[in-house]
Amino acid sequence: MNELLPIMVRHGYGLIFAVLMAEALGFPLPASIAMVAAGAAIASHTLWAPGVICAALLGLLLGDSILFWLGRYSGWALLALLCRLSMNPETCILRSAESFYKRGKGTLLIGKFIPGLNAMAAPLAGSMNMRYVQFLEFDVIGASLYSMSYLLVGYLARDLLAAILRGITAAGRAMEVAIGVALIIYAGYRVIQFANYRRYDLVPRVQVKDLIARIASDSQHLQIVDVRSHGYYDKGAERIAGSIRIEPNNLEEEIKNLPKEKELYLYCT
Amino acid sequence: MREATSARVAYLLREKGFSAFVIVGGLSTWRKAGGHLESVPKDDLVKLPSFA
Protein backbone atom coordinates (compact mmCIF):
# COMPACT_ATOMS: atom_id res chain seq x y z
CA MET A 1 0.00 0.00 0.00
CA ASN A 2 2.88 2.33 0.83
CA GLU A 3 4.13 1.95 -2.73
CA LEU A 4 0.79 2.51 -4.39
CA LEU A 5 0.60 6.30 -4.48
CA PRO A 6 4.15 6.83 -5.81
CA ILE A 7 3.39 4.30 -8.56
CA MET A 8 0.19 6.20 -9.26
CA VAL A 9 2.18 9.41 -9.58
CA ARG A 10 4.62 7.88 -12.07
CA HIS A 11 2.22 5.96 -14.27
CA GLY A 12 -1.09 7.62 -13.44
CA TYR A 13 -3.71 7.46 -16.14
CA GLY A 14 -2.15 4.58 -18.09
CA LEU A 15 -2.09 2.42 -14.97
CA ILE A 16 -5.73 3.18 -14.18
CA PHE A 17 -6.74 2.34 -17.74
CA ALA A 18 -4.76 -0.93 -17.80
CA VAL A 19 -5.83 -2.18 -14.36
CA LEU A 20 -9.52 -1.45 -14.89
CA MET A 21 -9.57 -2.92 -18.35
CA ALA A 22 -7.83 -6.07 -17.06
CA GLU A 23 -10.36 -6.37 -14.25
CA ALA A 24 -13.23 -5.94 -16.70
CA LEU A 25 -11.73 -8.78 -18.73
CA GLY A 26 -11.86 -11.04 -15.68
CA PHE A 27 -8.29 -10.83 -14.43
CA PRO A 28 -8.07 -10.84 -10.62
CA LEU A 29 -6.46 -7.43 -10.19
CA PRO A 30 -7.12 -5.01 -7.28
CA ALA A 31 -8.83 -2.37 -9.41
CA SER A 32 -10.79 -1.03 -6.44
CA ILE A 33 -7.57 -0.41 -4.50
CA ALA A 34 -6.06 1.30 -7.55
CA MET A 35 -9.11 3.57 -7.73
CA VAL A 36 -8.90 4.39 -4.01
CA ALA A 37 -5.25 5.31 -4.51
CA ALA A 38 -6.23 7.41 -7.54
CA GLY A 39 -8.83 9.19 -5.40
CA ALA A 40 -6.10 10.06 -2.90
CA ALA A 41 -3.87 11.22 -5.75
CA ILE A 42 -6.65 13.52 -6.96
CA ALA A 43 -7.07 14.91 -3.46
CA SER A 44 -3.35 15.67 -3.29
CA HIS A 45 -3.50 17.33 -6.75
CA THR A 46 -1.18 14.66 -8.17
CA LEU A 47 -3.70 13.49 -10.75
CA TRP A 48 -6.43 15.38 -12.58
CA ALA A 49 -9.91 14.08 -11.77
CA PRO A 50 -11.42 14.23 -15.29
CA GLY A 51 -8.36 12.42 -16.67
CA VAL A 52 -8.67 9.63 -14.09
CA ILE A 53 -12.40 9.25 -14.71
CA CYS A 54 -11.90 9.12 -18.48
CA ALA A 55 -9.09 6.54 -18.16
CA ALA A 56 -11.19 4.42 -15.79
CA LEU A 57 -14.34 4.53 -17.92
CA LEU A 58 -12.39 3.87 -21.11
CA GLY A 59 -10.69 0.83 -19.57
CA LEU A 60 -13.91 -0.58 -18.13
CA LEU A 61 -16.01 0.02 -21.24
CA LEU A 62 -13.36 -1.38 -23.57
CA GLY A 63 -12.95 -4.53 -21.44
CA ASP A 64 -16.71 -4.95 -21.08
CA SER A 65 -17.28 -4.44 -24.80
CA ILE A 66 -14.73 -7.11 -25.69
CA LEU A 67 -16.46 -9.60 -23.37
CA PHE A 68 -19.90 -8.49 -24.63
CA TRP A 69 -19.01 -9.39 -28.22
CA LEU A 70 -17.18 -12.56 -27.20
CA GLY A 71 -20.28 -13.52 -25.22
CA ARG A 72 -22.47 -12.81 -28.25
CA TYR A 73 -20.53 -15.24 -30.46
CA SER A 74 -19.25 -17.84 -27.99
CA GLY A 75 -22.23 -18.12 -25.64
CA TRP A 76 -21.79 -20.46 -22.72
CA ALA A 77 -18.26 -21.49 -23.72
CA LEU A 78 -16.86 -18.11 -22.64
CA LEU A 79 -18.93 -18.08 -19.45
CA ALA A 80 -17.60 -21.54 -18.58
CA LEU A 81 -14.06 -20.28 -19.16
CA LEU A 82 -14.59 -17.25 -16.92
CA CYS A 83 -16.03 -19.53 -14.21
CA ARG A 84 -13.21 -22.03 -14.56
CA LEU A 85 -11.49 -20.98 -11.33
CA SER A 86 -14.70 -21.43 -9.41
CA MET A 87 -15.12 -24.59 -7.28
CA ASN A 88 -18.38 -25.22 -9.07
CA PRO A 89 -18.44 -23.71 -12.57
CA GLU A 90 -22.07 -24.58 -13.23
CA THR A 91 -23.21 -22.82 -10.07
CA CYS A 92 -21.04 -19.84 -10.98
CA ILE A 93 -22.75 -19.52 -14.36
CA LEU A 94 -26.22 -20.08 -12.99
CA ARG A 95 -25.84 -17.52 -10.22
CA SER A 96 -24.85 -14.93 -12.79
CA ALA A 97 -27.75 -15.89 -15.04
CA GLU A 98 -30.15 -15.77 -12.09
CA SER A 99 -29.05 -12.24 -11.37
CA PHE A 100 -30.26 -11.28 -14.84
CA TYR A 101 -33.52 -13.11 -14.18
CA LYS A 102 -34.07 -11.13 -10.96
CA ARG A 103 -32.73 -7.72 -11.91
CA GLY A 104 -32.79 -7.72 -15.69
CA LYS A 105 -30.70 -4.98 -17.24
CA GLY A 106 -30.17 -3.49 -13.77
CA THR A 107 -27.55 -6.19 -13.28
CA LEU A 108 -25.23 -4.05 -15.40
CA LEU A 109 -25.61 -1.18 -12.93
CA ILE A 110 -24.53 -3.12 -9.84
CA GLY A 111 -22.63 -6.05 -11.33
CA LYS A 112 -19.21 -4.51 -10.86
CA PHE A 113 -19.67 -4.38 -7.12
CA ILE A 114 -20.46 -8.10 -6.87
CA PRO A 115 -17.47 -10.48 -6.95
CA GLY A 116 -18.02 -13.22 -9.50
CA LEU A 117 -20.66 -11.28 -11.35
CA ASN A 118 -18.39 -8.37 -12.29
CA ALA A 119 -16.79 -10.17 -15.23
CA MET A 120 -19.89 -12.16 -16.13
CA ALA A 121 -22.46 -9.41 -16.68
CA ALA A 122 -21.10 -8.17 -20.02
CA PRO A 123 -20.75 -11.57 -21.74
CA LEU A 124 -24.14 -12.62 -20.36
CA ALA A 125 -25.71 -9.50 -21.86
CA GLY A 126 -24.01 -10.35 -25.15
CA SER A 127 -25.15 -13.96 -25.12
CA MET A 128 -28.71 -12.80 -24.40
CA ASN A 129 -28.71 -10.66 -27.55
CA MET A 130 -28.96 -7.34 -25.80
CA ARG A 131 -28.54 -4.46 -28.27
CA TYR A 132 -25.01 -3.05 -28.02
CA VAL A 133 -26.16 0.57 -27.76
CA GLN A 134 -28.52 -0.36 -24.95
CA PHE A 135 -25.74 -2.34 -23.27
CA LEU A 136 -23.44 0.68 -23.46
CA GLU A 137 -26.08 2.95 -21.92
CA PHE A 138 -26.37 0.73 -18.85
CA ASP A 139 -22.67 -0.10 -18.73
CA VAL A 140 -21.63 3.56 -18.75
CA ILE A 141 -23.83 4.19 -15.72
CA GLY A 142 -22.59 1.03 -13.95
CA ALA A 143 -18.94 1.78 -14.70
CA SER A 144 -19.39 5.39 -13.53
CA LEU A 145 -20.98 4.29 -10.26
CA TYR A 146 -18.20 1.79 -9.66
CA SER A 147 -15.26 4.06 -10.42
CA MET A 148 -16.73 7.15 -8.73
CA SER A 149 -17.49 5.23 -5.53
CA TYR A 150 -13.90 4.09 -5.03
CA LEU A 151 -12.49 7.44 -6.14
CA LEU A 152 -14.66 9.11 -3.52
CA VAL A 153 -13.46 6.73 -0.83
CA GLY A 154 -9.85 7.49 -1.77
CA TYR A 155 -10.57 11.21 -1.95
CA LEU A 156 -12.15 11.26 1.50
CA ALA A 157 -9.51 8.96 3.01
CA ARG A 158 -6.64 10.96 1.61
CA ASP A 159 -5.43 11.89 5.09
CA LEU A 160 -5.15 8.26 6.08
CA LEU A 161 -3.32 7.41 2.88
CA ALA A 162 -1.03 10.40 3.29
CA ALA A 163 -0.29 9.28 6.84
CA ILE A 164 0.66 5.86 5.57
CA LEU A 165 2.90 7.44 2.97
CA ARG A 166 4.62 9.47 5.64
CA GLY A 167 5.64 6.19 7.11
CA ILE A 168 3.46 5.90 10.17
CA THR A 169 4.45 2.40 11.18
CA ALA A 170 1.35 1.69 13.19
CA ALA A 171 -0.96 2.43 10.30
CA GLY A 172 1.21 0.37 7.98
CA ARG A 173 1.21 -2.54 10.41
CA ALA A 174 -2.52 -2.27 10.95
CA MET A 175 -3.01 -2.50 7.20
CA GLU A 176 -0.67 -5.48 6.97
CA VAL A 177 -2.48 -7.21 9.83
CA ALA A 178 -5.86 -6.51 8.21
CA ILE A 179 -4.67 -7.91 4.88
CA GLY A 180 -3.09 -10.89 6.65
CA VAL A 181 -6.28 -11.66 8.57
CA ALA A 182 -8.33 -11.34 5.39
CA LEU A 183 -6.00 -13.75 3.57
CA ILE A 184 -6.18 -16.26 6.45
CA ILE A 185 -9.99 -16.08 6.51
CA TYR A 186 -10.10 -16.57 2.75
CA ALA A 187 -7.66 -19.51 2.90
CA GLY A 188 -9.75 -21.08 5.69
CA TYR A 189 -12.88 -20.67 3.62
CA ARG A 190 -11.25 -22.38 0.64
CA VAL A 191 -9.96 -25.22 2.87
CA ILE A 192 -13.47 -25.81 4.23
CA GLN A 193 -14.86 -25.75 0.70
CA PHE A 194 -12.17 -28.20 -0.43
CA ALA A 195 -12.92 -30.51 2.53
CA ASN A 196 -16.61 -30.46 1.60
CA TYR A 197 -15.77 -31.53 -1.91
CA ARG A 198 -13.36 -34.26 -0.71
CA ARG A 199 -16.23 -36.23 0.80
CA TYR A 200 -17.74 -36.48 -2.66
CA ASP A 201 -14.68 -38.54 -3.65
CA LEU A 202 -16.28 -41.39 -1.70
CA VAL A 203 -18.94 -41.77 -4.37
CA PRO A 204 -18.07 -44.74 -6.64
CA ARG A 205 -17.12 -43.88 -10.22
CA VAL A 206 -17.71 -45.86 -13.37
CA GLN A 207 -15.75 -45.63 -16.61
CA VAL A 208 -17.71 -44.94 -19.80
CA LYS A 209 -16.61 -48.19 -21.50
CA ASP A 210 -17.75 -50.21 -18.47
CA LEU A 211 -21.11 -48.46 -18.49
CA ILE A 212 -21.59 -49.07 -22.20
CA ALA A 213 -20.89 -52.76 -21.60
CA ARG A 214 -23.30 -52.75 -18.65
CA ILE A 215 -26.05 -51.19 -20.79
CA ALA A 216 -25.49 -53.82 -23.48
CA SER A 217 -25.91 -56.65 -20.99
CA ASP A 218 -28.70 -55.31 -18.78
CA SER A 219 -30.26 -51.93 -19.44
CA GLN A 220 -33.45 -52.65 -17.49
CA HIS A 221 -31.94 -52.16 -14.07
CA LEU A 222 -30.10 -48.92 -14.59
CA GLN A 223 -30.97 -45.35 -15.34
CA ILE A 224 -28.63 -42.66 -16.67
CA VAL A 225 -29.30 -39.28 -15.10
CA ASP A 226 -28.30 -35.91 -16.51
CA VAL A 227 -27.57 -33.38 -13.76
CA ARG A 228 -26.31 -30.57 -15.96
CA SER A 229 -27.99 -27.24 -15.65
CA HIS A 230 -26.47 -24.93 -18.18
CA GLY A 231 -26.50 -27.51 -20.97
CA TYR A 232 -30.22 -26.94 -21.06
CA TYR A 233 -29.86 -23.33 -22.10
CA ASP A 234 -28.15 -24.19 -25.40
CA LYS A 235 -30.08 -24.61 -28.62
CA GLY A 236 -29.37 -27.99 -30.16
CA ALA A 237 -28.20 -29.40 -26.82
CA GLU A 238 -27.56 -33.12 -26.68
CA ARG A 239 -27.63 -35.65 -23.90
CA ILE A 240 -26.83 -39.32 -23.42
CA ALA A 241 -29.50 -41.37 -25.17
CA GLY A 242 -32.17 -42.59 -22.79
CA SER A 243 -31.09 -40.37 -19.92
CA ILE A 244 -33.47 -38.38 -17.78
CA ARG A 245 -32.78 -34.97 -16.41
CA ILE A 246 -32.94 -33.80 -12.82
CA GLU A 247 -32.32 -30.25 -11.73
CA PRO A 248 -29.40 -30.39 -9.26
CA ASN A 249 -30.55 -27.27 -7.45
CA ASN A 250 -34.01 -28.68 -6.77
CA LEU A 251 -33.08 -32.13 -5.54
CA GLU A 252 -35.76 -32.57 -2.88
CA GLU A 253 -38.51 -32.39 -5.50
CA GLU A 254 -36.61 -34.27 -8.20
CA ILE A 255 -35.94 -37.27 -5.94
CA LYS A 256 -39.65 -38.11 -6.00
CA ASN A 257 -39.40 -39.02 -9.70
CA LEU A 258 -36.31 -41.22 -9.46
CA PRO A 259 -36.61 -45.03 -9.61
CA LYS A 260 -35.22 -46.32 -6.33
CA GLU A 261 -34.99 -49.91 -7.58
CA LYS A 262 -32.53 -48.99 -10.36
CA GLU A 263 -28.86 -48.12 -10.28
CA LEU A 264 -28.44 -44.45 -11.15
CA TYR A 265 -25.49 -43.28 -13.26
CA LEU A 266 -25.05 -39.54 -13.07
CA TYR A 267 -23.21 -37.23 -15.41
CA CYS A 268 -22.57 -33.56 -15.90
CA THR A 269 -20.43 -31.80 -18.50
CA MET B 1 -13.10 -29.96 -9.89
CA ARG B 2 -14.18 -32.52 -12.45
CA GLU B 3 -17.64 -34.05 -12.06
CA ALA B 4 -18.36 -31.60 -9.25
CA THR B 5 -22.11 -31.51 -9.76
CA SER B 6 -22.63 -35.20 -10.47
CA ALA B 7 -20.48 -36.20 -7.47
CA ARG B 8 -22.37 -33.85 -5.17
CA VAL B 9 -25.77 -35.04 -6.35
CA ALA B 10 -24.71 -38.71 -6.25
CA TYR B 11 -23.45 -38.25 -2.71
CA LEU B 12 -26.78 -36.75 -1.63
CA LEU B 13 -28.75 -39.48 -3.42
CA ARG B 14 -26.71 -42.16 -1.66
CA GLU B 15 -27.55 -40.53 1.64
CA LYS B 16 -31.21 -40.94 0.66
CA GLY B 17 -30.74 -44.64 -0.04
CA PHE B 18 -30.28 -44.57 -3.82
CA SER B 19 -27.62 -46.63 -5.55
CA ALA B 20 -25.92 -43.78 -7.37
CA PHE B 21 -22.66 -43.69 -9.36
CA VAL B 22 -20.72 -41.02 -11.22
CA ILE B 23 -19.80 -41.42 -14.88
CA VAL B 24 -16.12 -40.50 -15.13
CA GLY B 25 -15.56 -37.62 -17.53
CA GLY B 26 -19.27 -36.93 -17.94
CA LEU B 27 -20.86 -36.12 -21.27
CA SER B 28 -17.63 -35.12 -23.01
CA THR B 29 -16.01 -38.51 -22.32
CA TRP B 30 -19.19 -40.30 -23.34
CA ARG B 31 -19.20 -38.37 -26.62
CA LYS B 32 -15.52 -39.12 -27.29
CA ALA B 33 -16.16 -42.80 -26.64
CA GLY B 34 -18.83 -42.79 -29.34
CA GLY B 35 -21.74 -43.39 -26.97
CA HIS B 36 -25.25 -42.79 -28.28
CA LEU B 37 -26.60 -39.27 -27.95
CA GLU B 38 -30.01 -37.70 -28.46
CA SER B 39 -31.30 -34.15 -28.72
CA VAL B 40 -32.65 -32.60 -25.55
CA PRO B 41 -36.46 -32.46 -25.98
CA LYS B 42 -37.70 -28.95 -26.71
CA ASP B 43 -39.89 -28.96 -23.61
CA ASP B 44 -36.86 -29.59 -21.42
CA LEU B 45 -34.91 -26.62 -22.73
CA VAL B 46 -34.81 -23.69 -20.33
CA LYS B 47 -35.22 -20.32 -21.95
CA LEU B 48 -32.89 -17.56 -20.84
CA PRO B 49 -34.20 -14.02 -20.82
CA SER B 50 -33.49 -12.38 -24.14
CA PHE B 51 -33.14 -8.67 -24.82
CA ALA B 52 -33.49 -9.08 -28.58
Image (cartoon, coloured by chain):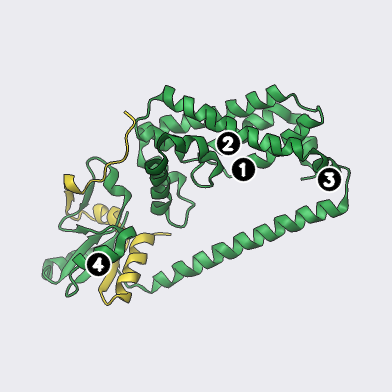
Chain colours: A green, B yellow
Mark 4 / mark 1, whichever is N-terminal: 1
How far apart marks 1 and 2 lie (CA) works out to 7 Å
- Label 1 close to label 2 by CB (< 8 Å): yes
How far apart marks 3 and 4 lie (CA) works out to 58 Å
Residue labelled with disc 1 = A29
Residue labelled with disc 3 = A164
Q: Secondary structure at mark 2?
A: helix
Q: Residues within 10 Å of mark 1 (few under 14, many from 20)?
A: some
Identify the residue at image location x=40%, y=70%. Answer: A200
Marks 1/3 same chain:
yes
The kind of residue tagged 2 is: Ala
Coordinates of residue A69 in the picture (x, y in percent): 42, 29
Report the chain holding disc 2.
Answer: A
Q: Residues within 10 Å of mark 2 (few under 14, many from 20)?
A: many
Coordinates of residue A45 in the picture (x, y in percent): 81, 27
Coordinates of residue A185 in the picture (x, y in percent): 63, 62
Mark 2 / mark 4, whichever is N-terminal: 2
Residue A255 circle label: 4
- Label 1 close to label 3 by CB (< 8 Å): no
Mark 2 / mark 3, whichever is N-terminal: 2
Q: Is residue A38 above or below residue B14?
A: above
In the image, which is nearer the foreground, mark 1 or mark 3?
Answer: 3
The kind of residue tagged 3 is: Ile
Q: Quadrant of the N terminus of chain A?
A: top right
Marks 2/3 same chain:
yes
